[in-house]
Image (cartoon, rainbow, N blue to C red):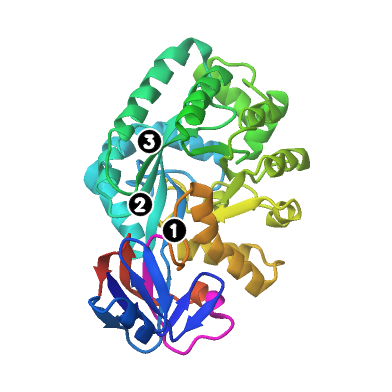
Protein backbone atom coordinates (compact mmCIF):
# COMPACT_ATOMS: atom_id res chain seq x y z
CA UNK A 1 0.00 0.00 0.00
CA UNK A 2 1.20 3.51 -0.88
CA UNK A 3 -0.30 6.93 -0.28
CA UNK A 4 0.20 9.92 -2.55
CA UNK A 5 -1.07 13.45 -1.95
CA UNK A 6 -1.23 15.88 -4.86
CA UNK A 7 -2.66 19.38 -4.72
CA UNK A 8 -5.51 18.36 -7.02
CA UNK A 9 -7.14 15.26 -8.54
CA UNK A 10 -9.09 15.23 -11.83
CA UNK A 11 -11.26 12.17 -12.22
CA UNK A 12 -11.98 13.06 -15.11
CA UNK A 13 -14.90 15.52 -14.75
CA UNK A 14 -14.62 16.46 -11.06
CA UNK A 15 -11.70 18.41 -9.58
CA UNK A 16 -10.86 17.35 -6.03
CA UNK A 17 -8.76 19.37 -3.58
CA UNK A 18 -7.06 18.38 -0.31
CA UNK A 19 -7.47 14.66 -1.03
CA UNK A 20 -4.92 11.85 -1.09
CA UNK A 21 -4.95 8.44 -2.77
CA UNK A 22 -4.18 5.11 -1.14
CA UNK A 23 -3.35 2.50 -3.76
CA UNK A 24 -1.79 -0.83 -4.54
CA UNK A 25 -2.41 -2.14 -8.07
CA UNK A 26 -5.86 -0.58 -7.73
CA UNK A 27 -7.02 2.58 -6.00
CA UNK A 28 -8.12 1.56 -2.52
CA UNK A 29 -9.38 4.83 -1.05
CA UNK A 30 -9.54 8.55 -1.78
CA UNK A 31 -9.81 10.73 1.33
CA UNK A 32 -7.96 13.43 3.31
CA UNK A 33 -4.39 12.43 4.13
CA UNK A 34 -4.93 12.09 7.89
CA UNK A 35 -7.82 9.70 7.32
CA UNK A 36 -5.72 7.51 5.02
CA UNK A 37 -2.80 7.48 7.46
CA UNK A 38 -5.11 6.21 10.19
CA UNK A 39 -6.53 3.53 7.89
CA UNK A 40 -3.12 2.48 6.51
CA UNK A 41 -0.54 3.40 9.19
CA UNK A 42 2.28 1.41 7.58
CA UNK A 43 1.86 2.85 4.08
CA UNK A 44 4.62 5.22 2.92
CA UNK A 45 3.36 8.71 2.09
CA UNK A 46 4.52 10.92 -0.78
CA UNK A 47 3.40 14.55 -0.65
CA UNK A 48 3.72 16.16 -4.07
CA UNK A 49 4.74 19.73 -4.81
CA UNK A 50 2.39 22.71 -4.98
CA UNK A 51 0.03 22.77 -7.99
CA UNK A 52 0.57 19.08 -8.68
CA UNK A 53 -2.35 17.38 -10.40
CA UNK A 54 -3.17 13.68 -10.73
CA UNK A 55 -5.21 12.64 -13.78
CA UNK A 56 -6.04 9.21 -15.20
CA UNK A 57 -3.52 7.58 -17.51
CA UNK A 58 -4.38 8.16 -21.18
CA UNK A 59 -5.78 5.40 -23.42
CA UNK A 60 -4.95 5.17 -27.15
CA UNK A 61 -7.55 2.72 -28.44
CA UNK A 62 -6.27 2.43 -32.03
CA UNK A 63 -2.64 2.42 -33.10
CA UNK A 64 -0.75 0.56 -35.86
CA UNK A 65 2.80 -0.02 -34.63
CA UNK A 66 4.20 -2.13 -37.46
CA UNK A 67 4.61 0.92 -39.72
CA UNK A 68 6.41 3.01 -37.11
CA UNK A 69 9.49 3.38 -39.34
CA UNK A 70 7.61 5.79 -41.62
CA UNK A 71 8.67 9.40 -41.67
CA UNK A 72 8.65 10.60 -45.30
CA UNK A 73 8.11 7.41 -47.32
CA UNK A 74 4.32 7.59 -47.68
CA UNK A 75 2.24 9.98 -49.77
CA UNK A 76 -0.29 12.21 -47.96
CA UNK A 77 -3.26 14.28 -49.12
CA UNK A 78 -5.28 11.61 -50.95
CA UNK A 79 -6.40 8.24 -49.62
CA UNK A 80 -5.85 6.19 -52.78
CA UNK A 81 -2.41 7.71 -53.43
CA UNK A 82 -1.52 6.97 -49.80
CA UNK A 83 -2.74 3.37 -50.17
CA UNK A 84 -0.62 2.79 -53.28
CA UNK A 85 2.37 4.27 -51.48
CA UNK A 86 1.79 1.86 -48.57
CA UNK A 87 1.78 -1.08 -50.97
CA UNK A 88 4.88 0.19 -52.74
CA UNK A 89 6.82 0.78 -49.52
CA UNK A 90 5.29 -1.90 -47.30
CA UNK A 91 8.17 -4.34 -47.44
CA UNK A 92 10.80 -1.72 -46.62
CA UNK A 93 8.73 -0.22 -43.82
CA UNK A 94 7.93 -3.58 -42.24
CA UNK A 95 11.45 -4.96 -42.44
CA UNK A 96 12.82 -1.58 -41.36
CA UNK A 97 10.86 -1.58 -38.12
CA UNK A 98 11.80 -4.53 -35.98
CA UNK A 99 11.29 -4.84 -32.23
CA UNK A 100 13.55 -1.92 -31.28
CA UNK A 101 11.73 0.46 -33.64
CA UNK A 102 8.31 -0.62 -32.37
CA UNK A 103 9.48 -0.39 -28.76
CA UNK A 104 10.61 3.18 -29.38
CA UNK A 105 7.09 4.05 -30.56
CA UNK A 106 5.63 2.39 -27.45
CA UNK A 107 8.04 4.30 -25.21
CA UNK A 108 7.13 7.57 -26.96
CA UNK A 109 3.48 6.88 -26.11
CA UNK A 110 4.47 6.31 -22.48
CA UNK A 111 6.35 9.62 -22.39
CA UNK A 112 3.20 11.42 -23.51
CA UNK A 113 1.12 9.76 -20.77
CA UNK A 114 -0.43 6.80 -22.62
CA UNK A 115 -0.76 3.98 -20.10
CA UNK A 116 -3.01 1.70 -22.18
CA UNK A 117 -3.29 1.17 -25.94
CA UNK A 118 -5.05 -0.94 -28.53
CA UNK A 119 -2.50 -2.31 -31.02
CA UNK A 120 -3.88 -3.22 -34.46
CA UNK A 121 -1.53 -6.00 -35.54
CA UNK A 122 -1.55 -7.02 -39.21
CA UNK A 123 1.44 -9.34 -39.22
CA UNK A 124 2.21 -10.15 -35.58
CA UNK A 125 5.59 -8.43 -35.84
CA UNK A 126 4.69 -6.14 -32.94
CA UNK A 127 3.78 -8.97 -30.56
CA UNK A 128 7.10 -9.20 -28.72
CA UNK A 129 7.36 -5.44 -28.23
CA UNK A 130 3.77 -5.31 -26.96
CA UNK A 131 4.42 -8.24 -24.64
CA UNK A 132 7.34 -6.33 -23.10
CA UNK A 133 5.53 -2.97 -23.01
CA UNK A 134 4.98 -1.38 -19.62
CA UNK A 135 1.48 -0.33 -20.66
CA UNK A 136 -1.76 -2.27 -20.68
CA UNK A 137 -2.25 -3.63 -24.21
CA UNK A 138 -5.35 -4.80 -26.03
CA UNK A 139 -3.73 -6.70 -28.89
CA UNK A 140 -6.07 -6.72 -31.91
CA UNK A 141 -5.05 -9.45 -34.37
CA UNK A 142 -6.22 -8.16 -37.74
CA UNK A 143 -8.03 -10.30 -40.33
CA UNK A 144 -7.87 -9.25 -43.98
CA UNK A 145 -8.70 -10.89 -47.31
CA UNK A 146 -11.53 -10.30 -49.80
CA UNK A 147 -10.92 -13.30 -52.07
CA UNK A 148 -12.88 -16.46 -51.25
CA UNK A 149 -10.24 -18.70 -52.86
CA UNK A 150 -7.69 -17.47 -50.33
CA UNK A 151 -10.00 -17.70 -47.32
CA UNK A 152 -8.57 -20.86 -45.76
CA UNK A 153 -4.94 -19.73 -46.00
CA UNK A 154 -5.71 -16.25 -44.69
CA UNK A 155 -7.78 -17.57 -41.83
CA UNK A 156 -5.06 -20.04 -40.92
CA UNK A 157 -2.53 -17.22 -40.69
CA UNK A 158 -4.96 -15.17 -38.59
CA UNK A 159 -5.52 -18.10 -36.20
CA UNK A 160 -1.79 -18.64 -35.79
CA UNK A 161 -1.29 -14.97 -34.86
CA UNK A 162 -4.28 -15.00 -32.52
CA UNK A 163 -2.98 -18.15 -30.79
CA UNK A 164 0.47 -16.58 -30.40
CA UNK A 165 -1.09 -13.56 -28.67
CA UNK A 166 -3.21 -15.81 -26.44
CA UNK A 167 -0.02 -17.51 -25.30
CA UNK A 168 1.17 -14.23 -23.74
CA UNK A 169 0.48 -14.41 -20.01
CA UNK A 170 1.13 -11.15 -18.26
CA UNK A 171 -1.03 -8.69 -16.36
CA UNK A 172 -2.57 -6.07 -18.60
CA UNK A 173 -2.23 -7.94 -21.92
CA UNK A 174 -5.50 -8.86 -23.68
CA UNK A 175 -5.72 -10.75 -27.01
CA UNK A 176 -8.44 -9.36 -29.29
CA UNK A 177 -9.65 -9.37 -32.92
CA UNK A 178 -9.74 -6.75 -35.67
CA UNK A 179 -11.66 -7.04 -38.95
CA UNK A 180 -9.81 -4.81 -41.39
CA UNK A 181 -12.74 -3.24 -43.27
CA UNK A 182 -15.94 -4.00 -45.23
CA UNK A 183 -14.13 -3.79 -48.56
CA UNK A 184 -11.17 -6.00 -47.64
CA UNK A 185 -12.61 -8.96 -45.69
CA UNK A 186 -14.87 -11.61 -47.22
CA UNK A 187 -18.08 -12.37 -45.28
CA UNK A 188 -16.98 -16.00 -44.91
CA UNK A 189 -13.92 -14.88 -42.98
CA UNK A 190 -15.87 -12.38 -40.90
CA UNK A 191 -18.38 -15.01 -39.76
CA UNK A 192 -15.64 -17.44 -38.78
CA UNK A 193 -13.73 -14.81 -36.82
CA UNK A 194 -16.81 -13.55 -35.01
CA UNK A 195 -17.63 -17.04 -33.80
CA UNK A 196 -14.30 -16.98 -31.98
CA UNK A 197 -14.98 -13.49 -30.65
CA UNK A 198 -18.35 -14.58 -29.24
CA UNK A 199 -17.12 -17.87 -27.80
CA UNK A 200 -14.05 -16.38 -26.15
CA UNK A 201 -15.58 -12.97 -25.32
CA UNK A 202 -12.80 -11.05 -27.07
CA UNK A 203 -12.82 -7.32 -27.82
CA UNK A 204 -13.49 -6.44 -31.44
CA UNK A 205 -12.65 -3.55 -33.75
CA UNK A 206 -12.86 -2.71 -37.47
CA UNK A 207 -12.15 0.16 -39.84
CA UNK A 208 -15.37 1.54 -41.30
CA UNK A 209 -16.16 4.23 -43.86
CA UNK A 210 -12.81 6.00 -43.87
CA UNK A 211 -12.75 7.36 -47.44
CA UNK A 212 -14.87 8.48 -50.36
CA UNK A 213 -13.37 5.59 -52.34
CA UNK A 214 -14.73 3.11 -49.79
CA UNK A 215 -18.16 4.78 -49.87
CA UNK A 216 -18.44 4.54 -53.66
CA UNK A 217 -17.05 1.00 -53.87
CA UNK A 218 -19.45 -0.40 -51.29
CA UNK A 219 -22.45 1.45 -52.74
CA UNK A 220 -21.88 0.91 -56.47
CA UNK A 221 -18.65 -1.10 -57.04
CA UNK A 222 -17.38 2.02 -58.80
CA UNK A 223 -15.06 4.91 -57.99
CA UNK A 224 -11.33 4.98 -57.29
CA UNK A 225 -11.31 1.52 -55.72
CA UNK A 226 -12.58 -0.04 -58.97
CA UNK A 227 -9.23 0.21 -60.73
CA UNK A 228 -7.40 -0.75 -57.51
CA UNK A 229 -9.34 -4.00 -57.02
CA UNK A 230 -9.37 -4.97 -60.70
CA UNK A 231 -5.61 -4.48 -61.10
CA UNK A 232 -4.38 -5.97 -57.85
CA UNK A 233 -7.02 -8.59 -57.00
CA UNK A 234 -8.90 -9.22 -60.26
CA UNK A 235 -12.06 -8.32 -58.35
CA UNK A 236 -14.88 -6.45 -60.13
CA UNK A 237 -17.42 -5.97 -57.33
CA UNK A 238 -17.38 -5.37 -53.60
CA UNK A 239 -17.84 -8.39 -51.34
CA UNK A 240 -20.64 -6.71 -49.35
CA UNK A 241 -22.38 -3.41 -48.91
CA UNK A 242 -22.07 -1.35 -45.74
CA UNK A 243 -25.27 -2.48 -44.06
CA UNK A 244 -24.54 -6.15 -44.79
CA UNK A 245 -21.16 -5.61 -43.17
CA UNK A 246 -22.66 -3.95 -40.08
CA UNK A 247 -25.16 -6.80 -39.64
CA UNK A 248 -22.30 -9.14 -38.73
CA UNK A 249 -21.69 -7.08 -35.58
CA UNK A 250 -25.27 -6.83 -34.31
CA UNK A 251 -24.63 -8.96 -31.22
CA UNK A 252 -21.14 -7.65 -30.45
CA UNK A 253 -20.40 -4.07 -29.33
CA UNK A 254 -17.59 -3.09 -31.69
CA UNK A 255 -15.11 -0.23 -31.99
CA UNK A 256 -15.44 1.20 -35.52
CA UNK A 257 -12.54 3.43 -36.54
CA UNK A 258 -12.94 6.61 -38.66
CA UNK A 259 -16.62 6.43 -39.82
CA UNK A 260 -16.30 9.82 -41.53
CA UNK A 261 -18.38 8.69 -44.54
CA UNK A 262 -21.30 7.13 -42.67
CA UNK A 263 -24.91 7.72 -43.65
CA UNK A 264 -27.76 8.43 -41.24
CA UNK A 265 -28.99 4.83 -41.68
CA UNK A 266 -25.56 3.46 -40.77
CA UNK A 267 -25.39 5.74 -37.73
CA UNK A 268 -28.80 4.47 -36.64
CA UNK A 269 -27.50 0.89 -36.81
CA UNK A 270 -24.34 1.83 -34.90
CA UNK A 271 -26.41 3.56 -32.22
CA UNK A 272 -28.92 0.71 -31.95
CA UNK A 273 -26.22 -1.86 -31.27
CA UNK A 274 -24.18 0.28 -28.88
CA UNK A 275 -21.04 0.39 -31.02
CA UNK A 276 -18.28 2.96 -30.47
CA UNK A 277 -16.68 5.25 -33.06
CA UNK A 278 -12.94 5.94 -32.83
CA UNK A 279 -12.09 9.47 -33.98
CA UNK A 280 -8.61 9.89 -35.56
CA UNK A 281 -8.54 13.53 -36.70
CA UNK A 282 -4.91 13.82 -37.78
CA UNK A 283 -5.03 10.62 -39.82
CA UNK A 284 -8.23 11.73 -41.55
CA UNK A 285 -6.69 15.09 -42.46
CA UNK A 286 -3.41 13.66 -43.77
CA UNK A 287 -5.17 11.08 -45.96
CA UNK A 288 -7.52 13.62 -47.51
CA UNK A 289 -10.64 12.30 -45.79
CA UNK A 290 -13.57 14.13 -44.23
CA UNK A 291 -13.75 15.35 -40.65
CA UNK A 292 -15.89 13.14 -38.42
CA UNK A 293 -19.37 14.60 -37.88
CA UNK A 294 -19.40 14.41 -34.10
CA UNK A 295 -22.59 16.46 -33.90
CA UNK A 296 -24.40 13.74 -35.87
CA UNK A 297 -23.00 11.09 -33.49
CA UNK A 298 -24.13 13.04 -30.45
CA UNK A 299 -27.63 13.43 -31.89
CA UNK A 300 -27.96 9.64 -31.87
CA UNK A 301 -26.12 9.15 -28.56
CA UNK A 302 -23.33 7.19 -30.26
CA UNK A 303 -20.29 6.59 -28.09
CA UNK A 304 -17.12 8.11 -29.54
CA UNK A 305 -13.53 8.21 -28.38
CA UNK A 306 -10.19 9.50 -29.75
CA UNK A 307 -7.05 7.69 -30.94
CA UNK A 308 -3.90 8.46 -32.92
CA UNK A 309 -3.98 5.73 -35.60
CA UNK A 310 -0.40 4.76 -36.58
CA UNK A 311 2.70 6.52 -37.83
CA UNK A 312 1.76 5.56 -41.37
CA UNK A 313 -0.87 8.33 -41.13
CA UNK A 314 0.36 10.51 -38.26
CA UNK A 315 3.53 12.34 -37.25
CA UNK A 316 3.47 11.35 -33.56
CA UNK A 317 1.59 9.07 -31.17
CA UNK A 318 0.45 11.74 -28.74
CA UNK A 319 -3.14 11.93 -27.50
CA UNK A 320 -2.81 15.46 -26.14
CA UNK A 321 -1.77 16.54 -29.64
CA UNK A 322 -4.62 14.54 -31.16
CA UNK A 323 -7.35 16.12 -29.07
CA UNK A 324 -5.85 19.59 -29.58
CA UNK A 325 -6.13 19.11 -33.35
CA UNK A 326 -9.71 17.89 -32.95
CA UNK A 327 -10.56 20.86 -30.75
CA UNK A 328 -9.59 23.23 -33.56
CA UNK A 329 -11.06 21.10 -36.36
CA UNK A 330 -14.53 21.22 -34.80
CA UNK A 331 -14.70 24.99 -34.62
CA UNK A 332 -18.49 25.08 -34.20
CA UNK A 333 -18.49 22.92 -31.04
CA UNK A 334 -18.88 24.66 -27.63
CA UNK A 335 -15.25 25.00 -26.58
CA UNK A 336 -15.16 23.87 -22.95
CA UNK A 337 -17.90 21.26 -23.29
CA UNK A 338 -16.16 19.74 -26.30
CA UNK A 339 -12.76 19.83 -24.54
CA UNK A 340 -14.24 17.79 -21.68
CA UNK A 341 -15.74 15.29 -24.13
CA UNK A 342 -12.38 14.93 -25.88
CA UNK A 343 -10.66 14.32 -22.55
CA UNK A 344 -13.19 11.62 -21.65
CA UNK A 345 -12.50 10.17 -25.10
CA UNK A 346 -8.91 9.40 -24.10
CA UNK A 347 -9.69 8.38 -20.50
CA UNK A 348 -12.96 7.07 -19.05
CA UNK A 349 -14.91 6.60 -22.30
CA UNK A 350 -11.94 4.88 -23.96
CA UNK A 351 -11.58 2.54 -20.98
CA UNK A 352 -15.25 1.56 -21.22
CA UNK A 353 -14.96 0.92 -24.96
CA UNK A 354 -11.94 -1.35 -24.47
CA UNK A 355 -13.39 -3.05 -21.38
CA UNK A 356 -10.53 -1.89 -19.16
CA UNK A 357 -10.86 -1.17 -15.43
CA UNK A 358 -9.13 2.18 -15.71
CA UNK A 359 -9.59 5.69 -17.10
CA UNK A 360 -10.73 7.27 -13.81
CA UNK A 361 -9.19 8.19 -10.48
CA UNK A 362 -11.81 6.29 -8.53
CA UNK A 363 -11.85 3.67 -5.80
CA UNK A 364 -11.68 0.19 -7.30
CA UNK A 365 -10.14 1.32 -10.59
CA UNK A 366 -6.62 0.30 -11.62
CA UNK A 367 -4.01 2.75 -10.38
CA UNK A 368 -3.08 4.10 -13.82
CA UNK A 369 -2.22 7.70 -12.98
CA UNK A 370 -0.27 10.68 -14.29
CA UNK A 371 1.20 13.45 -12.15
CA UNK A 372 0.99 16.75 -14.04
CA UNK A 373 3.02 19.78 -12.93
CA UNK A 374 0.71 22.76 -13.28
CA UNK A 375 2.13 26.27 -13.29
CA UNK A 376 -0.79 27.88 -11.50
CA UNK A 377 -3.82 27.04 -9.42
CA UNK A 378 -6.41 25.41 -11.75
CA UNK A 379 -9.82 26.90 -12.50
CA UNK A 380 -13.03 25.70 -14.12
CA UNK A 381 -11.32 25.57 -17.53
CA UNK A 382 -8.64 23.13 -16.37
CA UNK A 383 -9.37 20.49 -19.04
CA UNK A 384 -9.06 23.08 -21.79
CA UNK A 385 -5.74 24.24 -20.35
CA UNK A 386 -4.46 20.65 -20.24
CA UNK A 387 -5.15 20.39 -23.96
CA UNK A 388 -3.68 23.77 -24.92
CA UNK A 389 -0.53 23.72 -22.78
CA UNK A 390 2.05 20.95 -22.63
CA UNK A 391 2.49 20.64 -18.88
CA UNK A 392 5.24 18.34 -17.70
CA UNK A 393 4.26 14.76 -16.82
CA UNK A 394 6.54 14.10 -13.87
CA UNK A 395 5.29 10.66 -12.81
CA UNK A 396 3.50 7.78 -14.49
CA UNK A 397 1.93 4.91 -12.57
CA UNK A 398 0.59 1.78 -14.28
CA UNK A 399 -1.31 -0.73 -12.17
CA UNK A 400 0.15 1.04 -9.13
CA UNK A 401 3.76 0.68 -10.24
CA UNK A 402 5.87 3.81 -10.69
CA UNK A 403 7.00 3.63 -14.32
CA UNK A 404 8.32 7.16 -14.89
CA UNK A 405 9.68 9.61 -12.33
CA UNK A 406 11.34 12.87 -13.39
Q: Which of pointers 3 and 1 lies earlier in the amino acid sequence?
A: 3
Q: Quadrant of residue 213?
A: top right
Q: Which mark is residue 259?
A: none
Whether residue 282 is visible, yes or no, is no
Q: Does the magenta stretch mainly form a helix, a strand or a loop?
A: loop
Viewer-nearest residue: 160 or 151: 160
For the residue carrying disc 1, how many other residues have a C-alpha within 10 Å: few (<14), some (14-19), or many (20+)?
many
Residue holding disc 1: 358
Whether residue 112 is visible, yes or no, is yes
Residue holding disc 3: 89
Is residue 372 covered in magenta? Answer: yes
Give the magenta part as a residue range. Answer: 365-384
In the image, taking residue 318 as reference, residue 293 lies left or right, namely right
* Disc 3/disc 1 C-alpha distance (Å): 37 Å
* Disc 1/disc 2 C-alpha distance (Å): 10 Å
Give x and y (percent) for residue 2.
28, 72
Residue holding disc 2: 136
Do tag 1 and tag 2 residues touch (Cβ < 8 Å)? yes
The quarter of the picture where the N terminus appears is bottom left
Q: Which of pointers 2 and 3 lies earlier in the amino acid sequence?
A: 3
Do tag 3 and tag 1 residues touch (Cβ < 8 Å)? no
Single out the mark in the foreground, 1 or 2: 1
Viewer-nearest residue: 353 or 229: 353
Do tag 2 and tag 3 residues touch (Cβ < 8 Å)? no
As drawn, 330 above or below 353 = below
Viewer-nearest residue: 180 or 171: 171
Q: Which residue is located at x 27 percent, y 81 percent? A: 46
Single out the mark in the foreground, 3 or 1: 1
Amino acid sequence: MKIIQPSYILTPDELLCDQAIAFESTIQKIAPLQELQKAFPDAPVEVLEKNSLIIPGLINAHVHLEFSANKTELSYGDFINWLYSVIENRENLITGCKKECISQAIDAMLESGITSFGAISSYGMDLEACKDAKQNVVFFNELIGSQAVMADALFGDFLARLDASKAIKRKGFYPAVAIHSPYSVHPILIKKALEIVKNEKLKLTAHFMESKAEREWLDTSEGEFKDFFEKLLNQKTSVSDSCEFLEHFNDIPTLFTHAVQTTEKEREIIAQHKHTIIHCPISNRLLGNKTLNIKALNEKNINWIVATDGLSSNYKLDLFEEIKISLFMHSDAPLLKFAKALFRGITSDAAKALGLNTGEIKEGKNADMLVIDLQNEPNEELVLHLILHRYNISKVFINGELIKDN
